[in-house]
Image (tube, grey):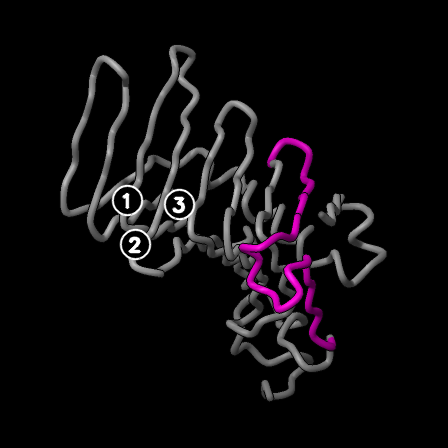
Amino acid sequence: MPHHRFSRYAAQAMLALAALACGAQALAAAADRNQPTTVDADALRYDDLKQTSIFTGNVVLTKGSLILRADRLELREDAEGYQFGVATANGGKLVNVRQRREGTDEYVEGVAERVEYDGRGELIHFISKAVVKRLACEQMVDEVRGQRVTYNQRTDTYTATGGPQAPTSNQRVRTIIQPRGQTAAGAPAAGCGAPASGKAAQ
């Protein structure tokens, strides 16, 4: 099964990895990490002994610019205060994660049938039909697909593997890179609609 490891610095030299590096910076945004977590859902079951909360029905987790949408979310906290989460979707739907890259107009979006968060290891796992993409002014810049895509927040690295649940025809990892001239990646930080060099935005 193919296995690829992406580093932020190598990504600067290869367009195929650039999206993953920017996504890493987005998911690790310090501003979001220090924000409170809010969860809206149709129902909640809390187990004080196990320190576990299970949210079901139209679950929306918000933490700064980070938004997670799922049908079910289980959150657990260990004795040292580290949080762990498992989000799933029903009926062929996918869990959706979206976060703004701090200080830019870029977003990272990821979807999968299951998303797991490991607070101790600072890992986010997109599992089964995983697709992670970077958007600039809501236009897709880069995308990676696989059976499993894992982001390590501590080391700013990704791993991606193929398999029978990869959303690709050949069950392998696939990366798509849009031509730079065809995206809004160069849009000014002040806003996607802001003109550059005195010219109207095209």
**Residue beneath disc 2:** 90
Can residue 110 be seen in this snapshot? yes
Asked whether residue 157 is drawn in magenta, I would say yes
Secondary structure beneath label 1: strand
Dot placed on the residue nearer the N-terminal end, 1 or 2: 1
Chain part drawn in magenta: 153-179
Disc 3 to disc 2: CB gap under 8 Å: no
Which residue is at the far right? 13
* Residue that appears at 64% across and 69% down: 141
Secondary structure beneath label 2: loop
Can residue 104 be seen in this snapshot? no
Disc 1 to disc 2: CB gap under 8 Å: yes
- The residue lying toward the viewer, choosing from 48 and 162, is 162
**Residue beneath disc 1:** 72
Gap in Å between the C-alphas at discs 3 and 2? 26 Å
Mark nearer the viewer, 1 or 2: 2
Question: In screen coordinates, is 185 left or right of 95?
Answer: right
Q: Quadrant of residue 7?
A: top right
* In this view, 194 is above or below 51: below
Question: In screen coordinates, is 42 left or right of 191?
Answer: left
Main SS, magenta residues: loop
**Residue beneath disc 3:** 64
Asked whether residue 117 is drawn in magenta, I would say no
* In this view, 115 is above or below 195: above
Dot placed on the residue nearer the N-terminal end, 3 or 2: 3
Dot placed on the residue nearer the N-terminal end, 3 or 1: 3
Disc 3 to disc 1: CB gap under 8 Å: no
Question: In screen coordinates, is 85 left or right of 195?
Answer: left
